Image: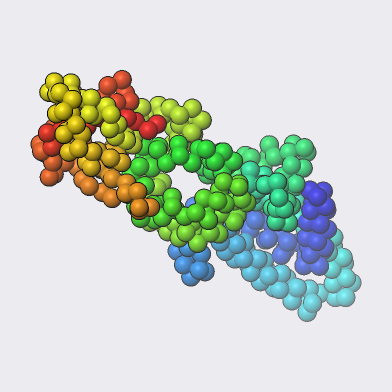
Amino acid sequence: MVWLIAFACLGLVGAGGYHSGPIRAGFSLVGLFFGVALARPLSPLTKHLLPLLGLAGPLWELFVPQVLAFLIVLIIFMIAGGAAHRKLGLHFKYKADEKQLLSWERLYRRLGLCVGLLNGAVYFFLLMIPIYIGGYFTAEAASEGNNPPAAQFLTKTRAELHDLKLDRVLAAYDPTPAQVYQASDIADLVLHNPLLKSRISHYPPFLTLGQRPQFQALANDEPLLEMIDRQADISQILKYPAVQAIVTNTALTGEIYGILGKDLNDLQEYLITGKSPKFDDETILGVWTIDPQATLAQERKRHGLTPRQMARVRQEMYPIITDLSLTATTDHQIILKKQSPSAANSTIVGVGTWKKDETYQVTIPGSKPENTEIEIEEGDTLLLPKDGYVLVFDKEM
């Protein structure tokens, strides 16, 4: 396939150079080089054209502005080449004799063929770059079922580029940010390992996003979860309305990018090992679930209660401590939630803040006391004094 594309580019563009002449072909060749050189510097300007073209979303912003800048520069040079060709053609047509005209036309076509072949080589190289880039993503997203013909073409052609060692050359001119490839690797890791869905939801930066209605809706969207569980084609998942609403939301995706930062190594390490080098030292971060038995044992230990007194305390505390969870986020929020057995969503029963001096200090308005110090034992047990009790939580992950 690669050689077929190469011969097609050389043949078609070379024939075009033969008929158009070396001036137009030469201007086009120079325009190709200038277009490639100026595509990235001019992309901030052409980015403003995306709304006019109906292309909204961060994915379009990665490549389309550069493509538009390249095409604009190329078209300008092609127009200039056409003007120069016309001026020279008029000179030979009206001011040269027939012999000079025939000699000039013969030379003009042969030179045009040579320059056209150079153009064809450049076009082949430029055409291979999007195939090289797109083939990486289609290869990762390929499923055992029937993949779209376009995806099969990209995957197969990129494999041929690798066999021919051309991918090494194309890699040097790949404009795709490294973070995009790493994000694709992470998405592929999660989609092909459904058990990682729970782990990624507990990644500390995502705990803040998880409080947003859009992401809570995703977590309870049964058709979407079913698609992920059966490892559906990634194109189907991206076309799902709820996912589209997030992917095309420039403000939200920008916020996600800001939360994760430019370094995705920590997220990738967390998914693979369950450990986050960046956030593990902040032991309060994460989701904690109440341990009713340990909480009651704490009360018995603190007050030396008799069995009869414990029965009364258990009756008082049980409605409070049943299905209670605590979430500590990276933006220093503490969120207490209670899961109702009859409701799909949990109910927020308290929101506060946390800070760390030598120990963790928590402020939860409405609690008694509002400001208190919490204790974390061995990194996976949290003791929270609240309303006269000491609530004991276990870390989920």
Q: Is residue 57 above or below residue 309?
A: below
Q: Residue furthest bottom?
A: 94
The residue at 50%/62% (across/down) is 241
Q: Quadrant of residue 160?
A: top right
Using the image as rendered, state which of residue 160 and residue 70 is in the foreground: 160
Residue, x 19% and y 42% (percent of image)? 352
Taking depth in this image into account, of 50 and 151 the one nearest to the observer is 151
The percent position of residue 148, horizontal first and vertical second, equals 70, 56
Q: Quadrant of the C terminus?
A: top left
| Left or right, residue 31 beside residue 209 | right
* Res 332 quadrant in image: top left
30 displayed left or right of 303: right
Q: Position of residue 204 (x, y in %)?
A: 36, 37
Q: Residue furthest front?
A: 308
Residue 209 rendering spot, x and y as whole percentages: 36, 47
Q: Residue at x 32, y 49 (%)?
A: 340
Q: As displayed, is residue 11 above or below residue 277?
A: below
- Choose between 362 and 259: the one closer to the eye: 362
The one of 38 and 207 positioned closer to us in this rendering? 207
Look at the image and tell me whether residue 122 can be seen: no
